Image (cartoon, rainbow, N blue to C red):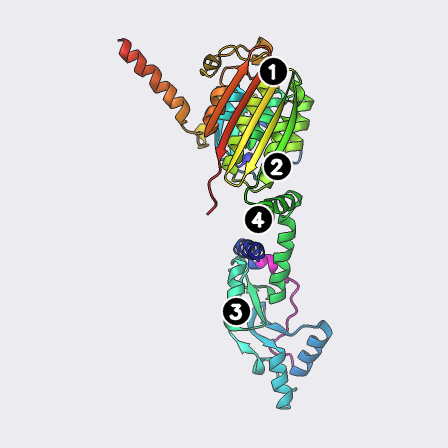
Amino acid sequence: MKLREVLEIIEGRLITQNVDLDMEVEMGCGADLMSDVLAFTHEGTLLMSGLTNPQVVRTAEMAGIKAIVFVRGKVPPPETIALAEEKGIPLLASKYTMFETCGRLSRAGLPRCGLFESSLRRWEEFFEKQREIE
Amino acid sequence: MKVTRTVQKKEITKLQELAYELKVGQAMTTDVITVTPQTTMAEFREILRANRISGTPVVEGGRMVGIISIEDLIKALAAGELGATVEEKMTKDPVSLYADEPLIHAVSKFERLGYGRFPVLDREGRLVGIIVQGDIVRALLHRLEIEYHEEEIHRYRASHIFEDILADRITLVFRYHVKGGDFAHGGEASSRLKRTLTRLGIHPHAVRRIAIASYEAEMNVVIYAEEGEITAEVQPDRIRLLVTDRGPGIPDVEKAMEPGFSTAPEWVRELGFGAGMGLPNIKDCSDEMRLESEVGVGTRLEIVIYLEPEG
């Protein structure tokens, strides 16, 4: 999905300058926990987040996140914008909540990042244990 | 010798890739000089001379009806037929190319047919340009110039380092200093390491794993310790990452490895960190992991990621 379409679907606005609106994002992830972003995304992901500090951009850079959408009307401080411009990571703004922003994009066909082995293992171990107790 | 061959092979592949990507329309000359069927061969000779070209399409009523070249002119000269019209001497129904065809079609047509030029048409059959072999070379070089921007040049230079250095064992060592409590600059060391590894031509998947592990470890140093150091040792088949700090240490290493266990203060959590996922994340990214810590002294984290052989 192109950033141009993302903006249209979420009725969003651009924060950073000189953005290539034809840039493709391959999937979406919504998270406010940076460790979750690092663990549960792939290269080429569009990140939805309510966190606006510069570490969001750093995290995006490390995880190969293509662009970031700030949800629930949050706008980032200047240092976040400056770092994003430097790293060439487009910042977008959505007035909608995390749920609605992700929902709109998902409905429009933006794929999810899928399941991850590490979390699935923990999930299965937990319910395995619970069954043993019963 | 081996190095040179590899370089050449890579360059050719890149050129071939571009020849598929670029369209004939992007390489052709659009400012086409044409003649009509009624033009005489004498007039045609003047047109060639004045424009320093070797052939033109023949157009009548907006449609291309043939092509005429310097070879046709030479034959006409030899036969003393300079008064003849272009129509009598031209090649009818010339082989042409479409503007939206990949450039590689032009390359193969030049090679197969041996002609000096091809007229270029749009899908409605209108003449939109002309292409000679020099146009192809120029378009490819121009595109290469655009594509090889600065970062690629860095990457190109650095990625051959393993081939260029001769030794039984090669280890490149990169060291980065990390300041504790400096949240504003937290992650800079990992950012620089990631860029360095990318330039070295290490596979993006491996780079991403190292970058994530290094960043999580760096943020731990920033949050908990006074100062620390990140060392990356790059070998052709593996990367060893060592993160050491002078800090409070971890009282119970096993407990710290449990997902969700955290001792992070509230301000750290508000920034999106300290949810007890850092160490489990590092473990998931690495092939080997060792964590040693002494309370009141510091922590030493060592991870190894194997690099898959290329090919």
- Identified at 62% across, 15% down, the residue is B225
Q: Which amino acid does the dot numbered 2 rest on? A: Thr
Do marks 2 and 4 share a subunit?
yes
Chain letter behind tag 1: B
* Label 3 element class: helix
* Residues drawn in magenta: B25-40
- Is residue B72 depicted above or below B205 in this figure? below
The quarter of the image holding the N terminus of chain B is bottom right
Q: Which mark is residue B223?
A: 1
The residue tagged 4 is B163
**Parent chain of label 3:** B
Q: Nearer the viewer, mark 1 or mark 4?
A: 4
Q: Which residue is mark 2?
A: B196
Number of labelled discs? Answer: 4
Amino acid type of disc 1?
Ile
User: What percent of the width, then of the height, locates residue A60?
Assistant: 57, 28
